[in-house]
Amino acid sequence: MDINALFTSEVGWSHLETLTDIGGRLPGSDAERRAAEATADALAAAGGRNVRLDTYDIAGWERGDSGITARETGETFGGVALPRSPSETASGPLVDLGYGLPEDFAETDLSGRIVMVAADVPEDADRHVHRTEKYGRAVENGAAGFLFRSTLDGDLPMTGSLGTEDEPIGEIPAVAVSKECGLMLARRFEGSDLEVAVEATIEPTTSRNVHAEIGPDTDEAILLTSHVDAHDLGTGAVDNGTGTAGVVEIVDALSGVDLDTRVHAVVFGSEEINLVGSEHGARELDTDRVKAVLNLDGIAQSRDLEAYTHGFEALRTLAEETGERFDHPIAVSDRTIPFSDHWPFVRRGVPTCFFTAAAEGPLRGWGHTHGDSLDKVDPRDLREQTILLAAFVAALADADVETTHEPPEAIADRLEAEGQAEGLKAMGWWPYGDG
């Protein structure tokens, strides 16, 4: 691997510009299709072989108008619908549940009410409580509508999808509001009637995954993954233009390198609607022949990388050795992350490493907001992190590096031990039966 060439390459950054110029790439949209086709072209130009698009059906969702009205005063307030909200209007007294922790729902009567929760959790929380879990608890407790309050300053509502694999469209209308709007609503209208209205077009459509390969034609393969779709508020630069640009750059860097193991790049569609693309990919691929999965999502939004190795010791060792080799910190954690495109593989027991940028602010930073634009990415950070990731892939491809799959039951036990099973069950994401 030529480090000098990687340090001066513009391949990844050029593709990042291409994706952000296409703009928001909501799953099933024409923009997502064009981004997938552009990514296929970029992977072919980078030296990938067997480049192809795998198309599959999804439940499409396209936003229309949405908003909030105070019944008492007639005032209207802006907001953006959460993808996969039903196209409906609901009204009822506003209840502000703060962070919306499980105990908050247990202690409050929500029947016929509009419930508002914050996007984050407090610093002393035992675990992260995902948006979908908060929504599910609101539905379960009889709420009529759902407001999702951003924790970012700057009038930036934070979007995110709802639904499950079996029930892709949510049950009650849901609107994201900015931090400033949400706090004002809580101050002025707690207990007063609000109307929450969502208009959306909901109809079947298609999405697609992009495939390419480099290295020898071995039965065993390393999966190098990202997702090409993005929410349509911003231009999807951080989430996840950076990850897809990283995949293209790594393919370009390693396409001429003598590897021992085939590298199969898969850029998924429809990650932002509950990992539909990677679930499709995990069903279609022979996961028994996957040496490991490396998923890139939200890299380069800060200086340093984080690697979540899900208890797979060989991957933890490689991540630590890569950081030491380049004298560049990589924060390594064994904690299981049940979100992003590695999840359909790790839950099946496939050795999996999730790379993202070290957090420097609330929740997901600029992701899922109007602020997710190209200016939020530092070219230096993308370049340096891509060098580390390419080195990691090259080291993992060595025939002397062995990984071991785990039975799904072991993953379930780990999630229980980490206290994450309760949330996944509340979300409808628990894949292990009754546990």
Image: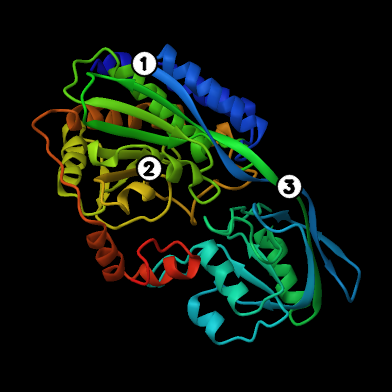
Q: Do we see residue 333 in this rendering?
A: yes
Q: Could you tell me residue 201's position as x and y percent? A: 75, 47
Q: Quadrant of the N terminus?
A: top left
Q: Nearer the viewer, mark 1 or mark 2?
A: 2
Mark 1 crowdedness (10 Å alpha carbons): few <14, some 14-19, many ≥20: some
Which residue type carries mark 3? Arg
Q: Do we see residue 380 in this rendering?
A: no
Vertical placement of residue 271 versus 347, above or below: above
What is the CA distance from the residue labelled 1 to the residue labelled 3?
37 Å
Which residue type carries mark 1? Arg
Label 2 sits on residue: 282
How many numbered dots are placed on residues in this image?
Answer: 3
Label 3 sits on residue: 63
Secondary structure at numbered mark 3: strand
Give the image quarter of residue 267.
top left
Compared across the picture, whether 339 is left or right of 221 comes to right
Vertical placement of residue 137 versus 397, above or below: below
Q: Could you tell me residue 213's position as x and y percent? A: 33, 22
Label 1 sits on residue: 49
Question: Between residues 169 and 1, which one lies in front from this camera angle?
Answer: 169
Q: Could you tell me residue 398's position as x and y percent? A: 14, 28
Q: Could you tell me residue 371's position as x and y percent? A: 61, 43
What is the CA distance from the residue labelled 1 to the residue labelled 2?
21 Å
